[in-house]
Image (cartoon, grey):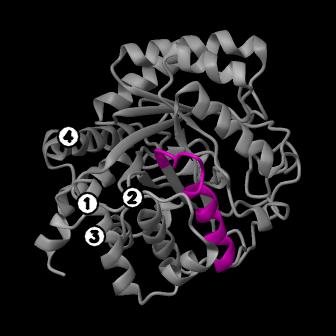
Amino acid sequence: MTLASAQNAQTTTIRNDWTKDEVTALFEMPFNDLLFQAQVVHRQHFNPNEVQVSTLLSIKTGACPEDCKYCPQSARYDTGLEKERLLEIEKVIERAKEAKQVGSTRFCMGAAWRNPRDRDMPYIVSMIEEVKKLGLETCMTLGMLTRDQAVALKQAGLDYYNHNLDTSPEYYGDIITTRTYEDRLNTLENVREAGMNVCSGGIVGMGETAADRASMLVQLANLPEQPQSVPINMLVKVKGTPLDSVEDLDYFEFIRTIAVARIMMPKSHVRLSAGREAMNEQMQAMCFMAGANSIFYGCKLLTTSNPDTHEDVMLFKKLGINTERTRDFSDEAHQQVLEEEIAQQAEGDADALFYDASKPTAAKASLKNESNTAEV
């Protein structure tokens, strides 16, 4: 099939009846064939040279009562993570303005909660309303939601709600015991019925099998409505969590997971999410070829390290991705980084090259607390 015929091919039908055997067969395809099939499907539904860009901010960090084995925000593990209260609305709006300035179109806010409490809801609603006034899409991840909470978030203007399945039903009990798989599915149902877009994916590299990765994608694709956004996270191992010494997942298996997700969920934005800092430009480019078309800008995902914004802009420029926006922001981003480095070095700050994207004018980002996020 030529490129022209691939672009003109009949649009892939959305399916909600995938079987594990079918998905296993996709994973077992020759690598080049799999990527080609994923690229064909991708071009039927998206511009292959456009990537949706979001910024993620932790609005409440640490002290989570859940026992997710990958997560340093759990109160059960000693990872050295500093706990933070719910951010003031003014600080959230400041970060949202900065996100828009560097080209993000969606602003995502995450809180380390099992579920939001009633007393927190007015603040959450105000955050959504104020970010919407900036012309940004809004997304939140707050843990489990009741039906009434989902409706309240929708009425406030929330566009997306993130709640990951994390892994397969078969492997889930080995990773989390404080909430069930059914709990997660129920929250997704509440979000859908409230009329919000669903953002739901998982984490790979947690010691699961290839069959588990296939099973997780079956669960996502066979939901009553496929998620509008599907984040695929690579585990970032954090000292102090039970998964800090798990064997690394082969990068080709990660790229295969992206490609299979694209084939199974043709109209979803597949997000290249946590773990991207460890990926070189070539691997990220292969993920885009495999069908990934969404990323987070900024050097932190909640508590997880992420490539700096200017590095992403420069990569986009090399690949011809988001051409118009990249042309607008590349020189500006590069100049901003240079000015910050010069100013900080002038102050004699040895750690000047490491900073927290949530506080771009002030703080240093400490690499000792690098961590993984599930809800992205």
Residue 223 in sight in this render = yes
Label annotation for residue 44 = 1
Instruction: Judge left or right: residue 199 versus residue 4.
Output: right
Q: Residue at x 50, y 52 (%)?
A: 230
Q: CA distance from mark 2 to mark 4?
A: 29 Å
Label annotation for residue 329 = 4
Lower position in the chain sequence, tag 1 or tag 2: 1
Q: CA distance from mark 1 to mark 3?
A: 6 Å
Q: Element under label 3?
A: helix
Choose top left, top right, bottom left or bottom right for residue 114: top right
Instruction: Judge left or right: residue 278 versus residue 369.
Output: left
Residue 87 in sight in this render = no
Q: Element under label 2?
A: loop
- Residue that numbered label 3 is attached to: 40
**Which part of the image, by quadrant, shows the N terminus?**
bottom left
Which residues make up the magenta segment?
210-229
Residue type marked 2: Pro
Lower position in the chain sequence, tag 3 or tag 4: 3
- Residue that numbered label 2 is attached to: 266
- Contact (Cβ within 8 Å) of mark 1 with mark 2: yes
Front: mark 2 or 4: 2
Q: CA distance from mark 3 to mark 4?
A: 30 Å
Image coordinates of residue 266 in percent, x first then y, are 39, 58
Choose top left, top right, bottom left or bottom right for residue 283: bottom left
Image coordinates of residue 290 in percent, x first then y, are 36, 69
**Magenta run includes residue 199:** no
Q: Nearer the viewer, residue 42 or 336?
A: 42
